[in-house]
Amino acid sequence: MPGTTANFAFPYQTDSDAPNGPLLGQQLAEAVDAAMLVRRPLVGNGALSSLYTLTNTQTDLAGTTVTINVPTSAAVYFASWTMAGQLMTAGNITAICQLVVDTVAQTAQAIWNPGNVAAASGSPRGGKSQQTSGLLSGSGNHVFKLQAQRVYPTGSTGDIRLDNVHTNLSVLVIPL
């Protein structure tokens, strides 16, 4: 059948085609099925694989890498992540967790600063969440992961340990 729609190339019968309803129905159903298949939402989740004490270096968080194979040349992504931790050693310290997409650190950060409080049994616990969205270009695998580090003013100390149960990443990708 030579006729196709402009946007999705769905087939339709033209005046010069011999009437054949079953064939037209099959071709249209197969074209719609193929169009919907490549545009279905893709989901990935990752969670910190074990307790992790932050360092002064931005470090990949094991278990939070999500790879999504995009079947189209462009897609939109939505990412949400949570960093949950516990102050282990008192100090004026800040924990920073951010998303990296295809080796590029994103600007949105989950930031927790428990303040300069005493760490003891029942140490302060906290969690921060963050969300972001963006456009992916190119088909194939796209890698999303979390990185985290601690920062504090010169002369200050402190340690924060991230919780592997509640430090996680969820990604939704919608092919265009």
Image (spheres, rainbow, N blue to C red):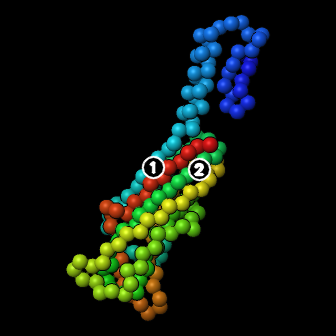
Q: Secondary structure at mark 1?
A: strand
Looking at the rendered structure, the kind of residue marked 1 is Gly
Q: Nearer the viewer, mark 2 or mark 1?
A: 2
The residue at the far right in this view is 16
Residue 62 seen from this side: no
The residue located at (48%, 52%) in the rendering is: 171
The residue at the far bottom in this view is 155
The answer to whether residue 138 is left or right of residue 69 is right
The answer to whether 127 is drawn above or below residue 27 in the figure is below
Image x and y of residue 64, in percent: 42, 59
| Res. 32 image quadrant | top right
The residue located at (58%, 63%) in the rendering is: 104
Q: Secondary structure at mark 2?
A: strand
The answer to whether residue 58 is left or right of residue 51 is right
Image x and y of residue 44, in percent: 45, 49
**Total number of numbered labels?**
2
- Tell which of 1 and 155 is nearer to you: 1
Image x and y of residue 41, in percent: 51, 42
The answer to whether 100 is drawn above or below residue 126 in the figure is above
Circles 2 and 1, Cβ within 8 Å, touching? The answer is: no
Looking at the rendered structure, the kind of residue marked 2 is Val
Q: CA distance from mark 2 to mark 1?
A: 14 Å
Residue 31 seen from this side: yes
- Tell which of 130 and 169 is nearer to you: 130
Question: Which numbered tag is attached to residue 81?
Answer: none
Residue that badge 2 annotates? 76
Q: Quadrant of the N terminus?
A: top right
The answer to whether residue 123 is left or right of residue 133 is left
| Res. 155 image quadrant | bottom left
Residue that badge 1 annotates? 44
